[in-house]
Amino acid sequence: MGGTFDPIHFGHLRTALEIQQWLSVGHVYLMPANVPVHRETPGSTAKARLAMVEQAIDGESALRCDPREIMSDRPSFTIYTLEMLRKELGLAKPVCMVVGMDSFLSFDQWFRFDEYLEYCHIIVVARPGYHFKPNQVLKQLLAKHQVERKSDILTQSAGSILVHELTPLSISATYIRELIANGQSPRYLLPDGVWNFIQEHKLYFSKKDS
């Protein structure tokens, strides 16, 4: 489960934990991006975002942090990460990439998107009773690759798209950054350890406050 995690919050963490429990797998790996290529430059450094992820999952054995994209000197194109994972894990082990519905709706704009399903399954997290209008490219992709059961992605190594309904917490990293910049507290939207880290390192504060 990748992202900028700028900063990581309970919405990210709860989604990851529910996916882990639903799939009955050992771990879900959170993978912060180094230099994101599909969105604006993050408000904090890559190392700070990595530290916040590690702080957030401290004590939760079901969640792990994978720093490979932060440690890489290449832009954070997910296809590079999937290639690395396949080299490490071999061709037989199932690999699942977790994305939100909003991200999936722009999936056909991702670098080498048409190769992803050679390396992994895609789990699209959607709100209950979701309604979405995929473009023609995504319609064709879903028609060919969408499955309905989690067993379909646990018994094959790659190649399927599964839309899974969750009730994600309505928390956004953008809102948290805005609160901090305006001198307000984001407590109870993210772990206390992450908020303490933000305060200690003066992340996201306006210049006059920092």
Image (cartoon, helix red, strand yellow):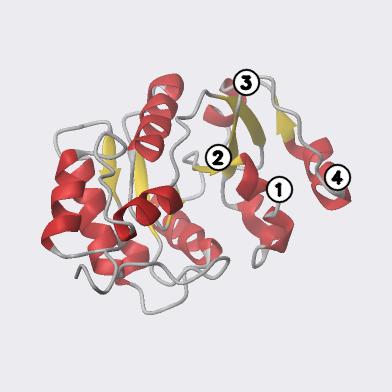
Verify CB contact (< 8 Å) between mark 2 and mark 4: no
Find numbered disc 3 in the image and state the secondary structure of the residue it sits on: loop
Camera-side mark, 4 or 1? 1
The amino acid at mark 4 is Gln
Query: Label 1 neighbourhood size at 10 Å, few (<14), some (14-19), many (20+)?
Result: some
Q: Is residue 146 left or right of residue 162?
A: right
Q: Pointer 3: what residue?
A: 128
Residue 105 - label: 1
Query: Label 4 neighbourhood size at 10 Å, few (<14), some (14-19), many (20+)?
Result: few
The amino acid at mark 1 is Leu
Pick whichever of labels 4 and 3 is earlier in the sequence.
Answer: 3
- Residue for point 73% across, 33% down: 146
Find numbered disc 2 in the image and state the secondary structure of the residue it sits on: loop
Image spot of residue 121 (x, y percent): 59, 41
Pick whichever of labels 3 and 2 is earlier in the sequence.
Answer: 3
Q: Pointer 2: what residue?
A: 157
- Residue for point 32% across, 60% down: 181
Q: Is residue 186 left or right of residue 87?
A: left
Pick whichever of labels 2 and 4 is earlier in the sequence.
Answer: 4
Where is 188 relative to 181, above or below?
above
Verify CB contact (< 8 Å) between mark 4 and mark 1: no
* Mark pair 1, 3: CA separation: 17 Å
* Mark pair 1, 2: CA separation: 23 Å
Pick whichever of labels 4 and 1 is earlier in the sequence.
Answer: 1
Q: Is residue 5 visible?
A: no
Residue at the bottom extreme of this rendering = 73
Verify CB contact (< 8 Å) between mark 1 and mark 3: no
Q: Pointer 4: what residue?
A: 140
Pick whichever of labels 1 and 3 is earlier in the sequence.
Answer: 1
* Mark pair 4, 3: CA separation: 23 Å
Camera-side mark, 2 or 4? 4
